[in-house]
Image (cartoon, rainbow, N blue to C red):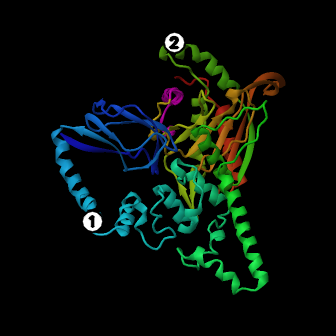
Amino acid sequence: MARVEMTMPKMGESIMEGTVLKWLKQVGDTIEQDESVLEVATDKVDTEVPALHAGVLQEILVQEGDVVPVGAPIAIVETDAAGASASAPAAAAEATPQASAPDTSDDEEEAAATVPHVPHATPPASSVASPAAGRFYSPLVLSIAREEGISLADLEQLPGTGAEGRVTKKDILDYVADGKKPLAQPQAAPAPTPAPASQAETPAAPAAQPEAKATAAPKSAATTESKSKPEEQKAKPAPSVSGNDELVEMDRMRKMIAQRMIDSKRISPHVTSFVEADVTELVNWRNQHKDAYKKRTGENLTFTPLFIQAIARAIQDLPNINVSVEGDYIIKKRDINIGVAVALPSGNLIVPVIHNADQLNLNGLSKRVNDLANRARQNKLKPEDLEGGTYTVSNVGSFGNVMGTPIIMQPQVAIMAVGAIKKKPAVIETPQGDLIGIRHFMFLSHSYDHRVVDGSLGGMFVRKVADYLEQFDPNTTI
């Protein structure tokens, strides 16, 4: 028999940690290889983690709700596989020196034992060199702290809303957005006095001070206490509601959406341009083909693949809209990966991505859109389904809205909202003269990042998409 460590897998690009949602297996349960063991949530998607080895779940190392860094052990599986037995002695050999280390010293070895749990603690010359021995910081939190120049002292004072008071990504981003107010300053006054003897020496210190300063000392201490309490209350506000109100805590996805929307508005100066398009030919073509398509494929023929095709063509004509920003650099994307906002049964939104949308025909786009939408509503999306988007479209018309001002999906620089299609009277130009007729119109709303997309490019792009929709070939086959 061999004991094999099950670790938190890497579930996508830039994902550094995951939250354990639910254990699907309990201690003592038999596990088959590739069988789902637990559900994990990341900032991109919820997914099930399969077992890499068959055996018996011997020990669970993390609990539901815990935030676990990628690569950290989460469970122990006992297996009799020959391949696993070879790796077990190596793991035991590494663990043996750590087990015998406490015999050589006390406090120093205890502090050193916490270091391996923080992979980012080793690089020198950073604002956060190593975390405090009694508090855990995820690699993502440490990385953000280094990038934002947050000192270890401020990080230690930052209130955490995670499990066991841990600092989460949202906590540190809120702190950055709040202007990085120095949390450690109120406690800087007692620092010059020795740590153990500070309380004993406090009464003697005012004796050497003038009377005015001595009387002021208790006030400053009280002020420090009064300042620290509001900071603690800020982390966990106590809402005030009446008997006619219902207090509902945001679910995890709603919290992530809220944070991303705040981040996007903080990062990108948004500008929105509007164009009204005559999509009569498009509507007539769909009405002509939707029943036959449904009968042949068993799927609905929606307007979404038609919108995506027009956007992909416009990106090919105006590639400077297909970029992202990193510092002072503009990154031009060669791939055209279009994200589609999908409404979930819970009311939340998720944005799966159609990769290389410019290389798919209408039939391929329709199948891809239906597949992603169905799996999104069934919570069966994979991390790769949500990665790599370079442009996003949101169909606000599905809710009966004629237009909207969508918020950009970072780090993209633009997003388009397509409104409801409405019948309107319009002037129709003919060789015999102008006539009044009934046509189908819709609004296109294009929000873009004014740091890198000027009004000319933003306006030309939405006009180009409208042109492709208005010039749709009614002889198109699918």
Q: What amino acid type is highlighted by mark number 1?
A: Asp
Nearer to the camera, 157 or 459: 157
221 relative position to 297: left or right:
right
Asked whether residue 357 is drawn in magenta, I would say yes
Q: Between disc 1 and disc 2, whose residue precedes?
A: 1
Nearer to the camera, 348 or 373: 348
Mark number, residue 120 = none
Bounds of the magenta span?
356-378
SS category of the residue bearing label 2: helix
Where residue 72 sits in the image (x, y, percent)? Answer: 37, 50
SS category of the residue bearing label 1: helix
Where residue 11 sits in the image (x, y, percent)? Answer: 42, 44
Where residue 148 sits in the image (x, y, percent)? Answer: 57, 65
Asked whether residue 381 is drawn in magenta, I would say no
Which residue in the protein does label 1 denote? 103
Q: Is residue 453 visible?
A: no
Nearer to the camera, 402 or 152: 152
212 relative position to 108: left or right:
right
Q: Is residue 84 visible?
A: yes
Which residue in the protein does label 2 denote? 295
Nearer to the camera, 297 or 292: 297
Residue 429, by quadrant, is top right
Q: What amino acid type is highlighted by mark number 2?
A: Lys
Residue 473, by quadrant, is top right
Quarter of the image with the N terminus in it? top left
Residue drawn at point x = 63 percent, y = 38 percent: 250
320 relative position to 138: left or right:
right
Residue drawn at point x = 59 percent, y = 24 percent: 302
